[in-house]
């Protein structure tokens, strides 16, 4: 497979073309504010399986799905608690991932067989435009080979993923360079599962 590089700043059709590739089950390198993601249509089991193959990631390590606004939460989570909307109002778009009960529309490939799903809204114009254009959430881990550092430029993504994915969208360097904070909202509490830029004090 030849990996193409898209430049959304110069090419007005880049986002629409990338969205069409995503809808056909393709794999994309996607800029976000944290690190570059290796994204696929989160509702397409086969596409999601190919993310794990491209990265060499164990199938039981669940993926984060990316949505363009908090009102998509109820599509992919069951009985969304008020706390989720409160956290979203304060921290989205941004590097906060929330874990809650998944709805049946989310394939088990995404969640590693768990009954919960991790969701976040990235703070990146291109990523948000892409998700809206595709009309589906994007499942994406970092766009590096498993065990390698997370990529913060399109060149880093190319070094690991050239020939393995359809497109890399070059959105320039990532602002943050660190993965999102992951919190669970299960059991009526907010529990930090993975520390990140958003700290316990900020959440409290
Ligand atoms: P990564 O895509 O490697 O940046 O990380 C995604 C991480 O989010 C996983 O490795 C888990 O630590 C966490 N995660 C994703 N989904 C879930 C879930 N359903 N339950 C608990 N943790 C999750
Ligand atoms: Mg990673």
Image (cartoon, grey):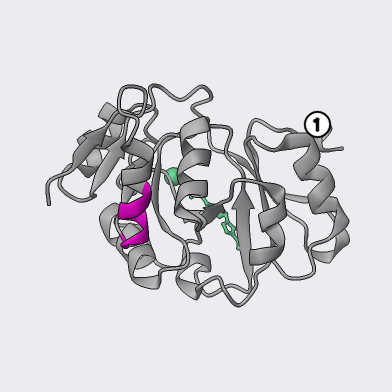
Farthest residue to the bottom: give it. 104
**Where does the magenta region start and end?**
19-25
* Residue 201 lies in quadrant: top right
Q: Position of residue 172 (x, y in %)?
A: 38, 22
At 40% from the left and 22% from the top, the residue drawn is 173
Q: Is residue 62 left or right of residue 89?
A: left
Q: Nearer the viewer, residue 12 or 3?
A: 12
Q: Position of residue 165 (x, y in %)?
A: 24, 49
Q: In the picture shown, does residue 7 fall above or below 108?
A: above
Q: Position of residue 86 (x, y in %)?
A: 84, 45
Which residue has dot 1 on it?
A: 202
Q: Is residue 106 left or right of residue 161?
A: right
Indicate yes or no whether the magenta region holds residue 20: yes
Q: Nearer the viewer, residue 185 or 102?
A: 102
Dominant secondary structure (helix, strand or loop) of the stretch shown in magenta: helix
Quadrant showing the C terminus: top right
At 45% from the left and 71% from the top, the residue drawn is 109
Farthest residue to the front: give it. 12
At 53% from the left and 32% from the top, the residue drawn is 124
Q: Is residue 50 left or right of residue 185?
A: left
Q: Does residue 96 appear in the picture of this structure? A: yes
Q: Residues within 10 Å of mark 1 (few under 14, many from 20)?
A: few
For ligand 1, give the image quadrant: bottom right
Judged from the image, the secondary structure of the residue bearing numbered disc 1 is helix
Q: Is residue 186 left or right of residue 146?
A: right
Indicate yes or no whether the magenta region holds residue 141: no
Q: Does residue 147 appear in the picture of this structure? A: no
């Amino acid at each position: 497979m030849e990996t193409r590089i898209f430049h959304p700043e110069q090419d007005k059709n880049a986002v629409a073309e990338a969205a069409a590739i995503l809808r056909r089950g393709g794999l994309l390198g996607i800029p976000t504010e944290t690190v570059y993601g290796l994204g696929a249509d989160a509702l397409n089991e086969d596409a999601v399986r190919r993310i794990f193959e491209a990265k060499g990631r164990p199938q039981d390590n669940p993926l984060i799905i990316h949505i363009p606004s908090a009102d998509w939460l109820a599509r992919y989570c069951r009985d969304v608690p008020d706390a989720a909307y409160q956290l979203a109002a304060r921290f989205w778009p941004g590097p906060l991932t929330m874990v809650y009960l998944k709805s049946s529309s989310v394939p088990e490939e995404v969640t590693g067989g768990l009954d919960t799903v991790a969701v976040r809204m990235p703070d990146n114009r291109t990523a948000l435009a892409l998700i809206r254009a595709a009309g589906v959430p994007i499942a994406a881990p970092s766009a590096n080979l498993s065990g390698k550092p997370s990529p913060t430029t399109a060149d880093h993504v190319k070094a690991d993923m050239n020939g393995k994915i359809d497109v890399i969208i070059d959105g320039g360097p990532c602002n943050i360079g660190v993965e999102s904070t992951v919190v669970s909202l299960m059991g009526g509490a907010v529990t930090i599962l993975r520390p990140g830029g958003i700290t316990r004090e900020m959440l409290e």
